[in-house]
């Protein structure tokens, strides 16, 4: 599968995983055929143009990052995606996008945008506030692996019913692998019996809050040291008066009664605490906090080797989860290729080559 943006897509998926702690990727074959006009002649001087109509087939296996807030799983205590059994995926589409994406569905004509809902019904009462009163369509996709069911509901209208002997029933899963078409991984496990993982911002939140507070106090102290507060017992001075450079002030008491409040320099222990917090942040970003290392420089070769080993071990955990995501996506992609790729599609990808052996997957 030749996709020049594959590496970039993998990067966005893992970035979503780092920020949110969990990433879920929908992998399926997307049929995308469109009519184009191939230009055969164009005269820039007159603007005259001639073209031939043709159909371009850009269908391929695609991957879509699912918003975690729009994914509903029945077993939050089950970390495995394959053992969920059923899932609900909600997407919000603009009215024009919905008409293009579901143009060939027969029941599309019964769907109206949220702004056109006038009658009060059970569905409108439970309709999302994102849809109500706006030109949006809420598309809910229901996947059930155990019962082999797949339903697409757009603003309360079932788009893909199957008619058998004058009766309608829910469509089966359109993929022959009969698994949930989702891949899932986490950034770092929170518990062995929990579906979601912990994110990097969640890990560094408390140390970062403390670090920000300490830097704020340090800057305030340095500001007071440069522009020191002045204390006096002169009753004629207005409360809150600020002395400005170059300005002449007339006082009614001894000038020696005005003194600057000297600020003590920042202690070494304060800097050590800042260094420790910054070290926690750095180690967390590189793969997790290990044993505390003193801030004395230079460190010995043994300490550097131990730190490198800890980083390598921690990064190995994240690489394990990332590799698991790639394996899940690859399996789904291969299954979709076997089912939907035509001979013309395969020949377009691999070229005109002869193979002596056929491997059954």
Image (spheres, rainbow, N blue to C red):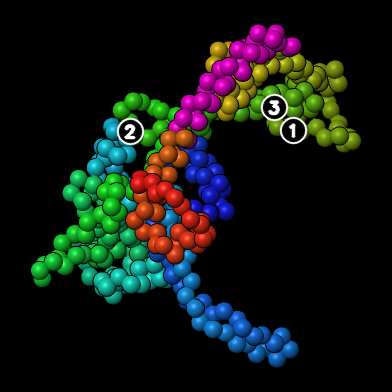
Residue 343 circle label: none
Relative placement, left or right, of 256 versus 266 is right
Residue 216 lies, in percent from the top left, at 65, 28
Residue 122 lies, in percent from the top left, at 19, 61
Mark 3 neighbour density, 10 Å: few (under 14) some (14–19) many (20 or more): few
Front-lying residue, 303 or 356: 356
Q: Is residue 192 above or below residue 256?
A: below
Residue 320 lies, in percent from the top left, at 46, 30
Chain-order first, disc 2 or disc 1: 2
Residue at mark 2 to residue at mark 3: CA–CA distance: 47 Å
Task: Please name the residue shown 51% across and 25% down the image.
Answer: 316
Q: Is residue 349 above or below residue 39?
A: above
Q: Which residue is mark 3?
A: 220
Residue at mark 2 to residue at mark 1: CA–CA distance: 63 Å
Quarter where residue 221 is shown: top right
Labels 2, 1: front one:
2
Q: Secondary structure at mark 3?
A: helix
Relative placement, left or right, of 260 versus 278 is right
Q: Are marks 2 and 1 in contact (CB under 8 Å)?
A: no
Task: Please name the residue shown 19% across and 65% down the image.
Answer: 162
Instruction: Give yes or no for residue 299 being in the magenta stretch.
Output: yes
Mark 1 neighbour density, 10 Å: few (under 14) some (14–19) many (20 or more): few
Residue 241 circle label: 1
Chain-order first, disc 2 or disc 3: 2
Quarter where residue 31 is shown: bottom left
Residue lying at the far front in this picture: please name it: 356
Q: Which residue is mark 2?
A: 79
Predominant SS along the magenta part: helix
Front-lying residue, 68 or 332: 332
Give, as a single range, the part of the protein colored magenta.
293-322
């Amino acid at each position: 599968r030749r996709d020049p943006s594959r590496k970039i897509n993998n990067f966005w998926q893992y970035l979503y995983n780092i920020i949110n702690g969990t990433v879920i990727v929908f992998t399926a074959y997307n049929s995308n055929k469109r009519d184009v006009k191939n230009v055969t002649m164009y005269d820039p001087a007159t603007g005259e143009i001639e073209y031939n109509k043709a159909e371009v087939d850009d269908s391929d296996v695609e991957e879509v990052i699912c918003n975690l807030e729009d994914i509903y799983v029945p077993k939050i205590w089950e970390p495995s995606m394959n053992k969920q059994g059923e899932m609900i995926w909600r997407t919000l589409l603009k009215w024009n996008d919905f008409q293009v994406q579901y143009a060939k569905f027969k029941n599309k004509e019964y769907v109206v945008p949220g702004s056109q809902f006038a009658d009060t019904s059970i569905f409108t009462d439970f309709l999302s506030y994102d849809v109500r009163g706006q030109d949006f369509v809420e598309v809910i996709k229901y996947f059930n692996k155990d019962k082999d069911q797949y339903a697409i509901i757009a603003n309360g209208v079932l788009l893909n019913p199957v008619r058998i002997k004058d009766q309608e029933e829910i469509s089966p899963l359109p993929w022959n692998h009969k698994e949930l078409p989702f891949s899932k991984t986490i950034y770092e496990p929170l518990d062995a019996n929990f579906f979601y993982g912990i994110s990097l911002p969640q890990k560094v939140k408390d140390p970062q809050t403390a670090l920000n507070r300490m830097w704020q106090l340090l800057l305030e102290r340095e500001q007071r040291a440069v522009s020191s507060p002045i204390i006096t017992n002169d009753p004629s001075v207005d409360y809150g008066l600020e002395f400005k450079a170059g300005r002449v002030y007339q006082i009614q008491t001894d000038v020696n009664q005005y003194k600057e409040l000297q600020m003590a320099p920042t202690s070494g222990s304060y800097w050590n605490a800042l260094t420790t917090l910054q070290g926690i942040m750095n180690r967390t970003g590189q793969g997790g906090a290990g044993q505390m290392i003193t801030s004395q420089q230079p460190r010995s070769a043994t300490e550097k080797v131990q730190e490198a080993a800890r980083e390598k071990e921690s990064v190995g955990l994240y690489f394990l989860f990332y590799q698991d995501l790639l394996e899940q996506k690859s399996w789904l992609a291969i299954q979709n290729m076997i089912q939907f790729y035509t001979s013309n599609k395969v020949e377009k990808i691999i070229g005109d080559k002869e193979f002596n052996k056929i491997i059954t997957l």
